[in-house]
Image (cartoon, coloured by chain):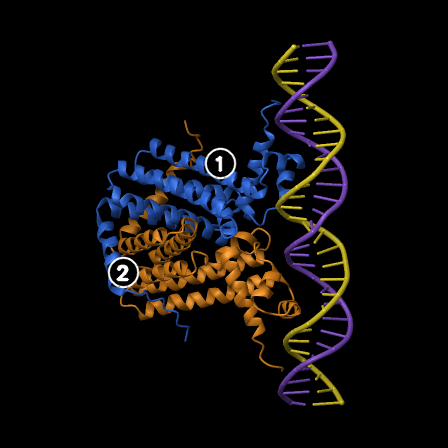
Chain colours: A orange, B blue, C yellow, D purple
DNA sequence: ATCACTCTATACAGACCTTTCAATAGACTT
DNA sequence: AAGTCTATTGAAAGGTCTGTATAGAGTGAT
């Protein structure tokens, strides 16, 4: 072997950063090799299937990195609630440090490419599910029933992603912080088993309502 | 004047739909005029500033439309909680009906273009704030203090947007439904004034922690 | 010296957004 | 009813950038 190339890593790192800021479609390959100070030919040497493969590898790489981060956060933290709070504040500080530029690369890739590449969408889905599973198992350890844990974990990730998007748009950490508070409330509700009653109610009302009304009336 | 042109409307409608599915960067002007069955020359006649202006008008238009929808939902509904539930189920059904293609155009535009056009980002921010304000005033009517209402409303919109993104990625309405349950829990917490204690705790811990730890350790 | 790996360089065909300008069409004025 | 005027449309071309592809030169270890 020649030298273990760090060129591929530089390409992946540059891609990740650019996908976070500009999304998948908004980022050109030329921009990537420029930022990664990588030779043009290396792109198709390391990623023979082109941009799509690059997208998949970015998603997988960052997805696993962040999953580990979530896991470690649960292990190190004193309580589940503190762990969740730390996750949200970490996202908030990253946003502030990057002048609200660095979003989540999975969202950046998925939203742009999910309708054109099913590979990419599927990769994103797997990553999201792994985050949810990691979070859920942390919640189970804290005493939340397995039945509820997955729903609570899903709502936390929703709040995290949505809060990140809204914080970037409004250039304020407030959405992320509100989502953090809501996540804590959700955990508390699950611990006191109130959530179970709620989700049951929701299921019943679905059964009775039949067709869901959408309420598409215009403003007066 | 010639006839009140519905050509501009067709262009805007097609743009909105395409931005919802493919995002701002992922949608070409050619695709827009094709789907809107509009003549090419009309594009720069009605939108002299090009794609950016088109994006702004799409955001404003859909933003106001959806804000009205939120407002009406609160007026018509029996309770705040039912109103919020309806909002989430409406998004879920729209997702299912469109085979998980139709996301939120504001997110689709903002994520792609916020770093390249500050006009676009600002327009999106105003819309999001108007949604939060509408939701918050509905919560105040239901008895939540003005101080909490805005935070709760923000967390609901975060959950709605994040849940929509996650539901599209995973091709399941479950994220949206979990976010719905969490939103209801948040409202309940605010009504019983637990949220206030939570947000105060968060503020204190911020003061004591000083620099926020990010926890960037790698997996073992 | 062989060999696999990595890089350089160039080329291409197509899509992108934008701009221009002349031709058309419709409605209002007289 | 004719003519004017403005709003709308048509076609074309601009230049930049896109992602993809190829082929040969450099590199270092075995």
Subunit under mark 2: B
In percent of the image, x 58 and y 71: which residue is there?
A8
Q: Quadrant of residue B6?
A: top right
What secondary structure is found at the residue carrying circle 2? helix
Which quadrant of the rendered structure holds the N terminus of chain B? top right
Q: Earlier in the sequence, mark 2 or mark 1?
A: 1
How far is disc 2 from disc 1 in space, using C-alphas? 39 Å
Q: Which residue is mark 1?
A: B61
Q: Which residue is mark 2?
A: B206
Name the one closer to the observer, A90 or B160.
A90
Is residue B104 in view from this perspective?
Answer: no
A167 relative to A46, above or below = above
In percent of the image, x 25 and y 61: which residue is there?
B207
In percent of the image, x 43 and y 56: which residue is there?
A100
What secondary structure is found at the residue carrying circle 1? helix
Q: Position of residue B120 (x, y in %)?
A: 49, 45
Q: Position of residue A51 (x, y in %)?
A: 61, 61
Q: Position of residue A52 (x, y in %)?
A: 60, 60
Subunit under mark 1: B
């Amino acid at each position: 072997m020649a030298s273990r190339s760090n060129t591929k890593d530089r390409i992946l790192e540059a891609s990740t950063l650019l996908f976070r800021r500009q999304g998948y479609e908004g980022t050109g390959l030329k921009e990537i090799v420029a930022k990664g100070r990588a030779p043009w030919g290396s792109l198709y040497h390391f990623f023979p299937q082109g941009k799509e493969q690059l997208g998949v590898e970015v998603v997988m790489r960052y997805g696993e990195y962040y999953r580990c981060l979530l896991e470690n956060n649960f292990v190190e933290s004193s309580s589940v609630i503190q762990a969740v709070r730390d996750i949200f504040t970490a996202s908030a500080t990253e946003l502030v440090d990057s002048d609200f530029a660095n979003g989540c690369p999975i969202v950046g890739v998925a939203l742009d490419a999910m309708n054109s590449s099913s590979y990419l969408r599927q990769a994103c889905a797997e990553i999201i599910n792994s985050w949810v599973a990691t979070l859920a198992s942390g919640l189970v350890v804290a005493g939340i029933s397995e039945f509820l844990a997955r729903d609570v974990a899903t709502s936390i990730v929703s709040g995290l992603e949505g809060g990140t998007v809204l914080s970037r748009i409004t250039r304020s950490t407030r959405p992320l912080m509100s989502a953090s508070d809501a996540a804590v409330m959700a955990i508390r509700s699950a611990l006191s088993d109130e959530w179970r009653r709620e989700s049951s109610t929701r299921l019943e009302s679905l059964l009775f309502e039949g067709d869901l009304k959408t309420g598409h009336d215009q403003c007066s």
